[in-house]
Image: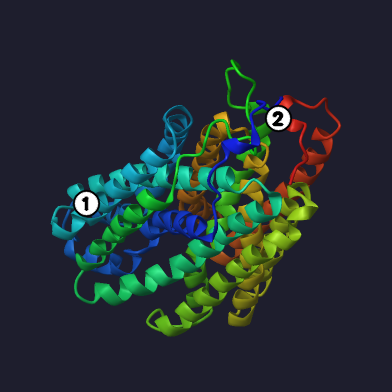
Amino acid sequence: MTDIPVPPSTRSRTPGPWQAALLLAGSCMPVMGSVLITPVLPQLSAHFGDAPGADILVPMIVAIPALMIAIFAPFAGQIVDRLGRKTLLIVAMLAYAVAGTVPAWLDSLGGILVSRAFVGVFEAAIMTVCTTLIVDYFHEARRRNRYLGLQTVATTLGATVFIAVGGAVGSAGWHAPFWIYAIAIPIAVLMIVSIWEPARSDSTDSHAVVGERAAVPWRAIALPLVVSLFGGFTFYVMIIETSYLVVGTGVAPTDTATIGLVAAIASLATAAGALLFPRLARRGSQQLVPTAFALQAVGMIIVWLTPAFAGVLIGAVIASFGSGILLPSLVTWALARTRFEDRGRVTGWWTAAFFFGQFATPIIVGGITAATGSLPVSVGVVGIAAAVVGVVVLLGTRASRTRAAAPLESEPLV
């Protein structure tokens, strides 16, 4: 690969913390879509309890957006590369606000599910564009790693805040939290005036040769995508299962203060790992990804071997700290060497892989629990699998450096 020779003056605008803040805020929208209404799920179950299949369909209100992200993110990536970034982002943000608030005036379980599916479609576009623009805007490795780490921090802490807000607003009824999706509208307005379409001739970015068809670099991203699929699964295991693990130690299900405290501490551990990522990034993803999986493995195995309250707390903190390092490491591994012309598609495929892992988490853990008869044992099994995958990644990345370099593999892995 060679870069297009263009004058340095082609880059006329310099992104800063304000643009980064807007992209981080946009990145939080898919997280809000997943967790905001979890506190009112019991109300929804009670309200639609007589509807056919309610036991399955009500939880799908939370789960279906992640599935839609997994399905439609690659299509969003195609649009990003062919038609541009900014327009898709603004349209998706506004459409997300509309689709997200629709259930506020619906009283139909089927209608709510349809609206939630559309929320997931628009989230796919938002997440793909925001991540693509972070890499577009911040080419210098230190700044890029900083903002990719902050993306994980923002989404992790945002999830904690959204759960709390959803619970507080939900006291007014299950319709009320859906109005919060309208927050995407003022963010979109700010994006209109503050975010710009990156120049395709930007000399500070990496480009395909003039006239070259920029195909998706499957050879370079195949391993990162497969590992990200598994990483999306391990990332959400502790997020989804911690409350059940705490209750399994003897804490009453009604003791939401204790359950929430453990979940909040684990969330802070994830944020701490992500904050540390920029300092560790110089070691390269070939080291950080296995290290993150190892930390997840240690934490999950502690939960398995010490299923008392202290063991669950310590294990959740260690595993979540590893998750905080894992997410930005996976993003960087997949995207750091992409060219402008194929970056949207690569981001879309990465987003699809990670969110499909998220969607599959309760299904896989449920299957393992059914086979083992114990949730702590199931978490331990996932921990062992994380350790194995970490070793495979370490060996695989070492082997890849001995092969003849492909065009997009000639640059250093960061």
Task: Mark yes or no: residue 198 visible.
Answer: yes
Q: Mark 2 or mark 1, which is nearer the start of the sequence?
A: 1
**Residue at the spot of label 2:** 408
Kindly identify the residue that appears in the image at 29 percent across and 59 percent down: 181
Q: Residues within 10 Å of mark 2 (few under 14, many from 20)?
A: some
Q: Residues within 10 Å of mark 1 (few under 14, many from 20)?
A: many
**Residue at the spot of label 1:** 112
Q: How is the image coloured?
A: rainbow
Please determine whether, in this image, residue 366 is positioned above or below residue 406. below
Please determine whether, in this image, residue 256 is positioned above or below residue 297. below
User: Which of the two residues, 16 or 402, is positioned nearer the viewer here?
Assistant: 16
Q: Estimate the spatial distance between the alpha carbons at disc 1 and disc 2, rounded to whole Å.
A: 43 Å
**Residue 401 placement, left or right of 37:** right
Point out residue 83 in the picture as x, y percentages from the top left corner: 42, 29
Point out residue 333 in the picture as x, y percentages from the top left corner: 67, 44
Point out residue 72 in the picture as x, y percentages from the top left corner: 41, 36
Inspect the image, locate mark 2, and give the three-letter code of the amino acid beneath it: Leu
